[in-house]
Image: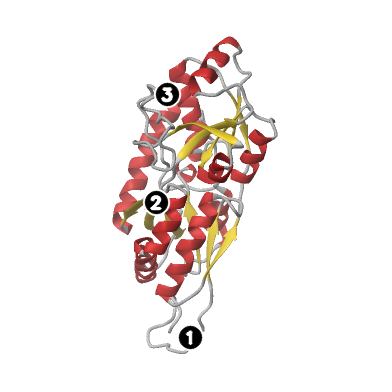
């Protein structure tokens, strides 16, 4: 088996691992799902794909580092959270989402939810709203970072509910779990890394942000059922640095597509309420532009757009 970037006919070209940057801490829903996808994709491409966790910046540090330093040879790729598109609309960044990445394949999305400590007096979202109206700014919520879909989503919800919440950013799910468990924040807004704690009865799931109720949490209402016309699942894919050879992109695309079609991978995704959301390379590129424009309106409406 030749390596992904081997010259034509170079059958003895050394096979080396591909690095997949996951811009979140190890052990969270994204990390676990991406490791499952990477393992199967590596088998299809004939090269191991090794996960490198580079957390920070609401999921942007890893992709930004790749864009700035990685060669476009296919050996360094990254999971691309929607924050990569959104943060440049909010502040100056070192990257341009449309120019500095080679988009490869779109994979899946999240089930987001809001939890409270099981011992909390907030037993429903209505309880939170009532308390927040009486105590503006005293309800705190943990997310995996400023500018993430959890942060923006909570601000959208708060605006529609007519309440003021206080955001407390962290680096990932392990930290947001600890924050709400330890009573450091009132709430946690995050992807389904909270699932084991909800199932253990340590956290209470107040709402989810998907279009329909989850089979895993049939008693938990959706945002729409609570009166908020929103569906927020922050779908994501994989990209490399700009300038990648289309042939390498095609090899990577095909391997990741086969991975998300694999029943074992789909079982892993289902454990975290993640649904396959495939887009081809060309569809993904188009999706990036559409997402940026949609996010521009949301950020502007919330008063969070950068001013210079």
Q: Quadrant of residue 122?
A: top right
Crowding around mark 1 (Cα neighbors within 10 Å: few <14, some 14 to 19, many 20+) is: some
Q: Residue at x 58, y 10 (%)?
A: 134
Above or below, 205 against 12 in this view is: above
Using the rendered image of the protein, determine whether residue 99 is visible from the camera's viewpoint.
Answer: no
Circle 3: is it few (<14), some (14-19), or many (20+) Cα within 10 Å? few
**Comparing labels 1 and 2, the label whose residue is closer to the camera:** 2
Q: Which mark is residue 172?
A: none
Q: Nearer the viewer, residue 212 or 141?
A: 212
- Which of the 4 quarters of the picture holds residue 300? top left
Q: Earlier in the sequence, mark 1 or mark 2?
A: 1
Q: CA distance from mark 1 to mark 2?
A: 33 Å
Q: What is the quadrant of the N terminus in the image?
A: bottom left
Q: x, y (%) of residue 177?
A: 62, 40
* Residue receiving disc 1: 13
Q: Nearer the viewer, residue 291 or 44?
A: 44
Residue 10 x, y percent position in the rendering: 42, 87
Q: CA distance from mark 3 to mark 2?
A: 27 Å
Q: Quadrant of residue 204?
A: top right
Q: Secondary structure at mark 3?
A: helix
Q: Position of residue 78 (x, y in %)?
A: 50, 58
- The residue indicated by pointer 3 is 301
Question: Disc 3 or 2, which lies upstream in sequence?
Answer: 2
- At a point 38% along the width and 29% down the height, the residue shown is 297
Q: CA distance from mark 3 to mark 1?
A: 53 Å
| Residue found at the far top of this picture | 134
The structure residue drawn at horizontal position 48% and vertical position 45%, both measured from the top left corner, is 84
Residue position for label 2: 108
Quick one: label 3 or label 1, which is nearer the N terminus?
1
Residue closest to the eye, 144 or 54:
144
Helix, strand or loop at mark 2: strand
Measured along the vertical axis of the image, is residue 41 above or below residue 15?
Answer: above
């Amino acid at each position: 088996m030749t390596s992904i970037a081997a010259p034509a006919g170079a059958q003895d070209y050394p096979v080396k691992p591909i690095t997949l940057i996951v811009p979140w801490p190890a052990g969270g829903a994204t990390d676990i799902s991406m490791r499952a996808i990477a393992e199967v994709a590596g088998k299809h491409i004939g090269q191991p794909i090794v996960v490198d966790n580079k957390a920070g910046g609401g999921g942007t540090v890893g992709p930004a580092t790749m864009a700035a330093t990685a060669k476009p040879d296919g050996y360094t790729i990254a999971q691309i959270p929607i924050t990569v598109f959104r943060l440049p609309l909010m502040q100056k960044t070192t990257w341009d989402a449309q120019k500095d990445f080679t988009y490869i394949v779109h994979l899946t999305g999240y089930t987001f939810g809001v939890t409270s400590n099981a011992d909390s007096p907030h037993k429903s979202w209505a309880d939170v709203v009532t308390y927040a109206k009486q105590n503006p700014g005293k309800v705190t919520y943990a997310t995996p970072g400023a500018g993430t879909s959890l942060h923006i989503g909570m601000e959208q919800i708060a605006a529609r509910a007519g309440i003021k919440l206080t955001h407390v950013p962290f680096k990932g799910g392990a930290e947001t779990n600890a924050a709400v468990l330890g009573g450091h924040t009132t709430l946690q807004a995050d992807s389904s890394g909270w699932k084991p704690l909800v199932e253990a009865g340590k956290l209470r799931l107040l709402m989810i942000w998907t279009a329909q109720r989850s089979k895993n949490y049939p008693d938990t209402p959706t945002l729409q059922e609570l009166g908020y016309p929103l569906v927020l699942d922050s779908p994501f894919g994989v990209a490399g640095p700009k300038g990648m050879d289309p042939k390498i992109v095609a090899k990577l695309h095909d391997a990741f597509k086969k991975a998300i079609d694999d029943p074992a991978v789909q079982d892993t995704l289902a454990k975290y309420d993640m649904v396959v959301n495939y887009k081809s390379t060309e569809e993904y590129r188009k999706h990036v532009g559409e997402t940026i424009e949609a996010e521009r309106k949301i950020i502007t409406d919330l008063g969070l757009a950068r001013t210079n």
